[in-house]
């Protein structure tokens, strides 16, 4: 007996959607150290759209083929999905090197540069560091935190109680706390004091570690 028409329609939509992601994945991610986010607003909107696309056709009709195919396409697009994570890691490493320079005379401009690096690396995930436009979007119900969008996308084929998904969400919470910590420290520090710079550098190192763990959690979601 032929499957209902809705299966064909949803499968066609899924094929178009995944082909779009796969095409973007062939582009090399920009991982240069820069205070500017590696993702444009259009890219973030795409992540948001993908995160809201549930595998309903595969689950509701008990068809494993389309779901497995979608999982494979997500794995192929993983470089694009993880590009912001790598870019943020490079930005944090740049900030760490700035903070640990020896025999350097630090000024308020250096502190402003470090603060800007932290804001760029956090990718709109620290509410107090968002600009007015992003704040307006968040208040309107739009998900603006890039790392949260990455989790939603990577775990979209997993159940709400799946341990891999739950672990990724916990790692996300740890990462966001780390970004909030370094942002708060940078706003209160005396950049000219070596002891203050050392404290921030240690916190940056911890944030890089949390970012590495978060990246592994996303990879686990894509491979589950």
Image: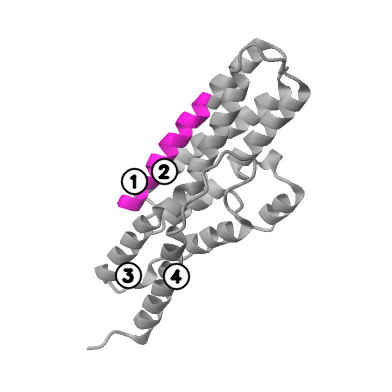
Answer with the quarter of the image where residue 180 lies.
top right
The answer to whether residue 119 is above or below residue 142 is above
- Residue assigned mark 3: 58
Residue 215 is a magenta residue: yes
Against 102, residue 135 (above or below) is below
**Residue 154 within the segment the image draws in magenta:** no
Question: Marks 2 and 3, Cα distance to the nearest angstrom?
Answer: 23 Å
Label 2 or label 1, whichever comes before in sequence order: 2
Q: Are marks 3 and 1 in contact (CB under 8 Å)?
A: no
> Can you tell which mark lies on residue 170?
none
In this view, the residue in front, 142 or 193, is: 193
> Earlier along the polypeptide chain: callout 2 or callout 4?
4
Q: CA distance from mark 2 to mark 4?
A: 24 Å
Give the image location of residue 63, x and y in percent: 26, 71
Residue bearing the label numbered 2: 168
- SS type, badge 2: helix
Q: State which region is magenta.
A: 205-224
User: Does any portion of residue 178 appear in the rendered image?
Assistant: no
């Amino acid at each position: 007996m032929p499957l209902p028409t809705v299966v064909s329609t949803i499968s066609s939509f899924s094929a178009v959607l995944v082909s779009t992601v796969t095409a973007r994945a062939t582009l090399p991610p920009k991982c240069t150290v820069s205070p500017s986010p590696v993702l444009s607003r259009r890219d973030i909107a795409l992540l948001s759209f993908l995160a809201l696309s549930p595998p309903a056709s595969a689950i509701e009709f008990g068809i494993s083929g389309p779901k497995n195919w979608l999982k494979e396409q997500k794995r192929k697009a993983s470089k694009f999905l993880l590009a912001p994570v790598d870019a943020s890691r490079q930005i944090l490493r740049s900030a760490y090197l700035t903070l640990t320079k020896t025999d350097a005379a630090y000024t308020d401009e250096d502190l402003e540069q470090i603060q800007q690096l932290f804001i760029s690396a956090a990718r709109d995930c620290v509410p107090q560091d968002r600009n007015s436009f992003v704040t307006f979007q968040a208040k309107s119900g739009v998900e603006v935190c890039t790392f949260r969008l990455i989790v939603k996308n990577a775990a979209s084929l997993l159940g709400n109680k799946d341990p891999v998904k739950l672990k990724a969400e916990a790692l996300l919470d740890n990462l966001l706390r780390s970004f909030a910590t370094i942002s708060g420290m940078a706003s209160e520090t005396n950049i000219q004091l070596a002891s203050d710079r050392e404290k921030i550098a240690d916190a940056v190192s911890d944030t890089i570690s949390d970012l590495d763990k978060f990246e592994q959690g996303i990879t686990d979601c894509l491979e589950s």
